[in-house]
Amino acid sequence: MEYHGSFGPACGDMETLSAMLEAGMTDIRLNLSHGLLRDKAEWIENLRRAEVRTGLRARLLIDLQGPEIRIGDLPGALELRDGETVRLGKGGVPTPEPVTARLPVGERLQLDDGLLLLEVTGKTPGALDCQVLRGGILTGRKSLCPLETELEMPSLTAEDRENLQAAPEFGVESVMLPFVRHRRNLTELRQAMAEAGLGGARIYAKIEDLRCAAALPELLDAADVIVIARGDLGNGMPLWQLPGVQKDISAQCRAAGTPFLVVNQLLHNMTEHPVPTRSEVCDIFNAVADGCAALMLTGETAQGRYPAQAMAMLRRTAQAALDWLNRQ
């Protein structure tokens, strides 16, 4: 069983990384949706120092931008109130051109992993006027997901290719690609990795919406690990349907013999509190009972108050599930 943490301000120092290694962390994810690999050289150096200090090691996994759609940078936090109008694109929130060009009036779209919901009410050249259906605070570089229209985006951004070229220097051993909807996404990634000298690194394919889930049969032998990424995956359906979709993906992976990883809010309560909820430990236990090969913490270690304690809880709960399986 693999236990993944995520880099962030809460765990970028050597002491915390040492504690996470001692708590059982086997891999650590670096989210590159917002920057370049070289910008995080200090965190990676602290990881290497922690490895020397503890005699333990963690594989470095980079999470690329890939075809995920995001808004651009904002000068500060923007409050969106229910019922008001907000402009995306020219003269408003910086938004990729395919979004403003292709989304029709009436399309609904989610921002920031579904926390905010908008509906397109009007179009002008290079911009969309949207009514806020579910408001909140919006900051820069947050995800944008249309609920109906599929927008074809490049498998790899220019920044992704730059990060892949730098990856061997930093000892990257795994690469994660978001929103994998076609086998060609993985073929293009594997070719770019080979050209960068990363031919031996593992590929993690993130299943983040129902289109990704529908493409799963053609991905199972093209990826080394399938990622059930429940954050965005849960945005595209009523939440009560998400557990069934997770079960279906798990079953397909088991049948194909493809390892899979479960991520998002496994120990969300431990972002702010030193203990999990009962439902969280049951969630982890059931993921292991369903056959997952790996579990990943995100905000719990990246921004949380108890990153090492969360990692220890993840490992202990998973081990309890493995012990239970061995007794069956």
Image (cartoon, rainbow, N blue to C red):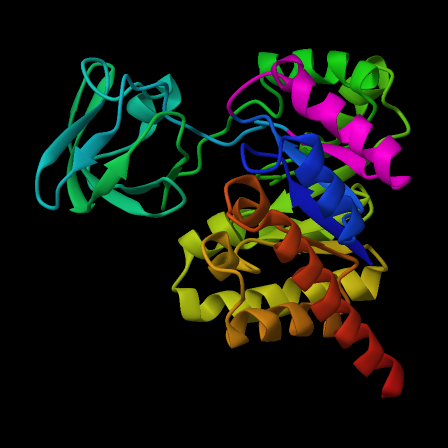
User: Considering only vertical position in the picture, is 292 above or below 131?
Assistant: below
Q: Which residues are magenta?
A: 34-63
Q: Quadrant of the N terminus?
A: bottom right
Left or right side of 195 for 317: left
In magenta segment, residue 257: no
Percent position of residue 228, x then y: 63, 54
Q: Quadrant of the C terminus?
A: bottom right
Picture quadrant where residue 222 is located: top right
Q: Nearer the viewer, residue 260 or 34?
A: 34
Percent position of residue 260, x then y: 74, 55
Asked whether the viewer can see residue 173, the reply is: no
Q: Nearer the viewer, residue 285 or 226?
A: 285
Percent position of residue 254, x then y: 80, 65
Q: Nearer the viewer, residue 314 or 157?
A: 314
Q: Residue furthest left?
A: 84
- What residue lies at 57% left-to-right and 27% top-to-bottom? 65
User: Considering only vertical position in the picture, is 124 above or below 121?
Assistant: above
- What residue lies at 31% left-to-right and 41% top-to-bottom? 109
- What residue lies at 51% left-to-right and 23% top-to-bottom? 34
User: Considering only vertical position in the picture, is 126 above or below 7?
Assistant: above
Percent position of residue 165, x then y: 75, 12
Left or right side of 181 for 237: left
